[in-house]
Image (cartoon, rainbow, N blue to C red):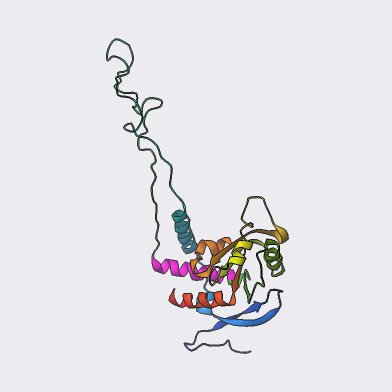
Amino acid sequence: MDEPAQDVVGLSRVETKILDAQGNTVGSVELNESHFKVDPKPHVLHEVVRAQVNNYMKKTASSLTRAQVRGGGRKPFRQKGTGRARAGTRTSPLWSGGGVIFGPKPRVVKTKPPRSLRRQAFRMAWSDRFSSDAVIVVRDFGLKEIKTKALLATLVGLGGVGRVLIALPEMDGVIEKSARNLRFHPGKTYAGGIKSVLVKCIDQITVYDILLADRLFLTEESLKLLQARMKGV
């Protein structure tokens, strides 16, 4: 039985295919097992994804305190003789239409897990996607003009299904504009079972993006940048 290929530091490597726009194998590339074959730990992934989702959210709920409610400058009725409980202002939180005690206010919630945890989660997410054959490396998408139908046909031919994420070395106007009408809508499915297409630069992809996608398409150059990033992660 052949021994796995070794790199200069003695780490074993795995291999993945490179396809062209028609789905034909045109080459292969070796990946470092220490970066792309890491056993996932659900609690690590959960903590990092939860932090990223919290950072996306905008806490905009807002209410008025008794000082901010309009009116209330005059005593609503006399102190004695009415049989009612005494009241000094209509803005009291006890009154309907009054202020809110400890109500919500717009706030910024930023959660930042430790760097070591973020590094682990990033490698685990990519390892999970590669091990489940959800990552497809292509040499070129072959798009010469902005055409949603052509991009959709190419993705379906390459095995795209569900939520699709395209990772590019830098934003390509043709691919980006071809995918702008393929956004996610609950209950809507495009040709070939594709539910959405998201285009992002490889250096902007988060753990949440990786795990949310059913299929991830990387160009050859994107994979090189990802490998370089893994060394620094």
Left or right, 54 with respect to 24, comes to left
* Vertical order, 92 against 102 (above or below): above
* Vertical order, 215 against 78 (above or below): below
Residue 64 at x, y = what percent?
37, 35
Residue 136 at x, y = what percent?
63, 72
Outermost residue toward the top in this view: 81
* Vertical order, 49 against 139 (above or below): above
Residue 97 at x, y = what percent?
40, 27
Left or right, 158 with respect to 112, comes to right
Specify the segment rendered in magenta: 114-129
Outermost residue toward the left in this view: 79
Kindly identify the residue that appears in the image at 46 percent across and 78 percent down: 231
Residue 124, magenta (yes or no): yes
Residue 176, magenta (yes or no): no
Secondary structure predominantly adopted by residues drawn in magenta: helix
Q: Quadrant of residue 67?
A: top left
